[in-house]
Amino acid sequence: MIDTTQLVAEAEAMREQLITVRRDLHAHPELAFREVRTAGVVAARLSELGFEVQSGVGKTGVVGILEGGKGAPEHGAVLLLRFDMDALPILEANHVPYRSQNDGVMHACGHDAHTAIGLGVAELLARHRNDWDGIAKFIFQPAEEIVEGALAMIRDGILNAPTPTRVLSMHVDSKLPRGKLGVTDGAIMASTDDFQVTLRGRGAHGSTPHQGADPIVAAAQVISAMQTIVSRNVSPMEAAVVSVGYIRGGTAQNIIPDTVEFGGTMRSYKEGVTTLLRERMRVIVTAVATGLDVEALITFSDHVTPSVVNDPVPTAIVRGVAGEVVGAANVLSDYRLAWAEDAAYYLRRMPGTFVFVGAGNADAGITEPHHSPRFNIDEGAMPIAAALLTASAMALMHGAND
Ligand SMILES: [Zn+2]
Ligand SMILES: [Zn+2]
């Protein structure tokens, strides 16, 4: 097998090419399920590289398949390599030559870099096709930001033959310095559940509150009581967040309104905790509201986005490769974020690993968080990611079925 040092050198030699692809995508961002131009760029390049390509999977997704040429491909694993392509509804505030030409739409999460990195990995695997066994099944996924693209691609059959048995994916991270890699076992990103609450009281004049039932006072108490879910119900050994993100009610200073609405998000890492958050939310909202003579209506999101959970076996393999790419001292094995990611749906169906690639650079002023209108990355992270994923893919596929 080809050694990692050589792949690092080859990926580094591709730096300008990766930057060109990323900047082109950055200038032409597309929202969820509208990644038509992006998918076109991806499909054309994969075809050039000799991949078997299928477009329009999960609406605007692209699948590219390449068989290794070292021995019979069935000796190796079928590896799903997942990259996301969508941008966000944000007006870009960066003044760079490759600024978004699609006003109000911006690659503010780095999915432009992910797509460029994916094509870089595809090229390296194609170039060294005779050095690996197995089947590489690339998916360029739409609509990660609205957490629907993964399920759309799964519904369109990407888990059918060749059936992937392992999955590898990644995200750049502007809060992690370039040159660092996060390769962590277990739950690394949060499960997300949203809630909406309507408190229905009885309106009255502000001077005669006893003639009504005040939903504003009830909302204040319900929201205060909700703070005990994390502090009193979740075990101190676990992590969770309950945040109210909006509250609406009332029109004038002397009118007690009929209703108040509020809503927010809950994040957790384990299924037991996710269930507990919903249960406690329901009981507290209903009981406190009832005690104040106000009716409570609570709804949760249709489906809870599960947490992203890395399997220890492939994660250990990738951690070893990461050490060869950036040096073991630069590999963080306890790095987690409270983001939600629909890669969770693949990782629930097969063992795999999701890595964070440091793309921040405080010296160059690249520190803005993801989803900020000033978000940017250190593009030097791209060759690192390409080398890491290529070498990891070869290692994960190799001899899996011998
Ligand atoms: Zn994002
Ligand atoms: Zn993202």
Image (cartoon, rainbow, N blue to C red):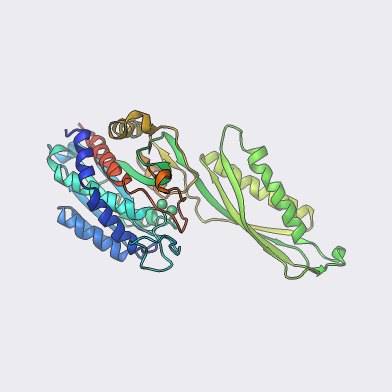
The number of callouts visible is: 0
Q: Is residue 75 left or right of residue 320?
A: left
Q: Is residue 104 visible?
A: yes
Q: Is residue 283 left or right of residue 142?
A: right
Tell me which residue sits at (32%, 57%) in the image. 156
Which quarter shows the C terminus? top left
Q: Where is residue 51 drawn, in percent x and y?
A: 17, 52
User: Which image quarter: residue 399?
Assistant: top left
Q: Where is residue 255 drawn, in percent x and y?
A: 79, 69
Tell me which residue sits at (37%, 37%) in the image. 180
Q: Is residue 381 above or below residue 33?
A: above
Tell me which residue sits at (48%, 42%) in the image. 337
**Which one is in front, 283 or 376?**
376
User: Which image quarter: residue 155?
Assistant: bottom left
**Which one is in front, 333 or 377?**
377
**Which one is in front, 370 or 44?**
370
Q: Is residue 48 left or right of residue 25?
A: left
Q: Where is residue 117 drawn, in percent x and y?
A: 28, 49
Residue sticking out furthest to the front: 363
Q: Is residue 54 above or below residue 363?
A: below
User: Which image quarter: residue 348?
Assistant: top left
Tell me which residue sits at (77%, 57%) in the image. 217
Q: Is residue 57 visible?
A: no
Which quarter shows the N terminus? top left
**Which one is in front, 159 or 31?**
31
